[in-house]
Image: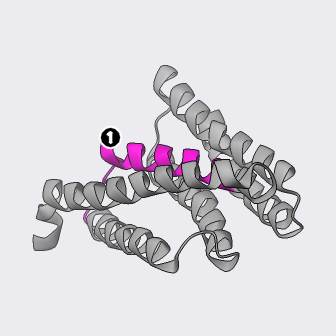
Amino acid sequence: MNLPNKLTIARVIAVPFFIIAFIMELYLIAFIIFVLASLTDLLDGQIARKRNLVTNFGKIMDPLADKILVYSALCLFVEFGTVPSWMLIVILAREFAIAGMRTVAASEGIVIAAGMSGKIKTVLQMIAVPILILGHGFFTDFLMPIGNVVLWASIIATVYSGIEYIAKNKKVFTI
């Protein structure tokens, strides 16, 4: 297994530690774990492209690892009343739709890689989440509104990227 794929797996392994820290209200530790895990996303992609280590495993698991990390945080935010549940539902609906498309495409030997709008959505989510994590324990009146604005931007990017994926890959619906 190459280094980028190991970093992707490390991101998934970090999730339970993040969840435990957040639930125990160790928000600074949860923040650090989340940020470090998020940085592995940047690092694995750079290494994979630079060293020509892009694999089908990476194309599929890298975005999945991002989702596991980010959506774990969003689930916690819904439970703690930080994020309305409808936002998580919109995000998950888009993800299930795209995952379904990818599954159908994969059954035909087609790999649908992450597009730029999907990456922007992920980056916005990965910016919103740490701001909201810190907002739980520090500077709540200042950080929560900022985190919510970035989260709203990610919702818009989520809907846009979902529409874009469907439009660009509509051939999957005829398989």
Q: Residue furthest top?
A: 50
Q: Nearer the viewer, residue 122 or 27?
A: 27
Residue drawn at (38%, 68%) of the image: 99
Q: How is the image coloured?
A: one colour
Q: Is residue 67 above or below residue 36?
A: below
Q: Number of marks in the image?
A: 1
Q: Amino acid at mark 1?
A: Met
Q: Is residue 95 left or right of residue 164?
A: right
Image coordinates for residue 64, horizontal then vertical, percent? 52, 58
Is there any visible trace of residue 57 in the rendered image? Answer: no
User: In the image, is residue 122 part of the stretch drawn in magenta?
Assistant: yes
Picture coordinates of residue 33 (x, y %)?
78, 48
Task: Locate residue 80 relative to residue 157 in the image: left or right.
Answer: right
Give the residue number, with chain letter if any, for mark 1: 116
Q: Residue at x 47, y 46 (%)?
A: 124
Residue shown at the point (84%, 49%) measured from the top left: 28
Q: Position of residue 38 (x, y in %)?
A: 64, 43
Residue 22 at x, y percent in the picture: 81, 63
Residue 80 found in image quarter:
bottom right
Q: Secondary structure at mark 1?
A: helix
Q: Residue drawn 56% across and 44% down?
A: 127
The magenta stretch is 108-132
Identify whether 51 is placed above or below 96: above
Q: Does residue 166 appear to the left or right of 93 in the view shown?
A: left
Q: Main secondary structure of the magenta part?
A: helix
State which quadrant residue 79 falls in: bottom right
The quadrant the N terminus occupies is: top right
Q: Is residue 41 above or below residue 108?
A: above
